[in-house]
Amino acid sequence: MKEGIHPEYRDVVFQDTSTGIQFLIGSTIKTPKTCEYEGKQLPLVTVDISSASHPFFTGKQKFIDAAGRVEKFQRKYNWGKKDEAATEEAPKS
């Protein structure tokens, strides 16, 4: 590898702002903030959502009935009715 062209890879603390949970991860991100984590002064990056607060990972996800959404779309735009009307009007041989 060439010297001097790669960013510095180091330990960085990522903090979820909604839960306050901190994660220690290796990263090349640059940040002016620092915090003390396990007795060491490390760079700090705050994030709005992490696995500690995302609904998919916390089990608080809302499940939406996909079939109901499709039927609602079809009713709204009269989607299925066009096909039915076309087959009814077509002459039978």
Image (cartoon, rainbow, N blue to C red):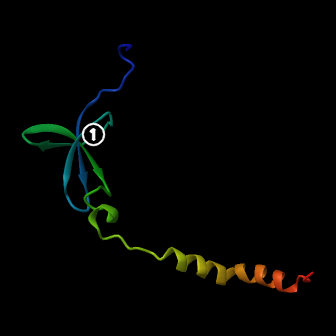
- Residue at point 77% right, 83% down? 84
Closest to the observer, 8 or 25: 25
Q: Residue furthest left?
A: 39
User: Residue 20's spot in the image, x, y percent?
Assistant: 19, 58
Q: Which residue is mark 1?
A: 32
User: In the rendered view, would you say 8 is above or below 15?
Assistant: above
Please tell me how many numbered marks the rendered image carries: 1
- The quadrant of the image that shows the C terminus is bottom right
Seen as rendered, the residue at the extreme front is: 93
* Mark 1 Cα-neighbour bin, 10 Å: few <14, some 14–19, many ≥20: few
Which quadrant does the N terminus fall into? top left
Residue shown at 12%/43% (left/top)? Answer: 37
When the figure is inspected, residue 61 is found, relative to residue 33, above or below; the finding is: below
- Image height of 28 relative to 3, above or below: below
Q: Would residue 12 appear left or right of 40 to someone viewing this image?
A: right
Residue placed at 32% from the left, 36% from the top? Answer: 30
In the current view of this chain or complex, which residue is farthest to the top?
2
Q: Position of residue 38 (x, y in %)?
A: 8, 42
Callout 1 secondary element = loop
* Residue type (three-letter) at the residue carrying disc 1: Pro
Q: Percent x, y for residue 44?
A: 23, 44
> Viewed as shown, does residue 63 lie left or right of 90?
left
Q: Residue at x 35, y 26 (%)?
A: 7
User: Where is 61 relative to 54, above or below?
Assistant: below
Q: Where residue 58 sits in the image (x, y, percent)?
A: 27, 64
Q: Report whether 90 appears left or right of 82.
A: right
Which of these two is toward me, 68 or 58? 68
The quarter of the picture where residue 29 lies is top left
| Nearer to the camera, 8 or 61 | 61
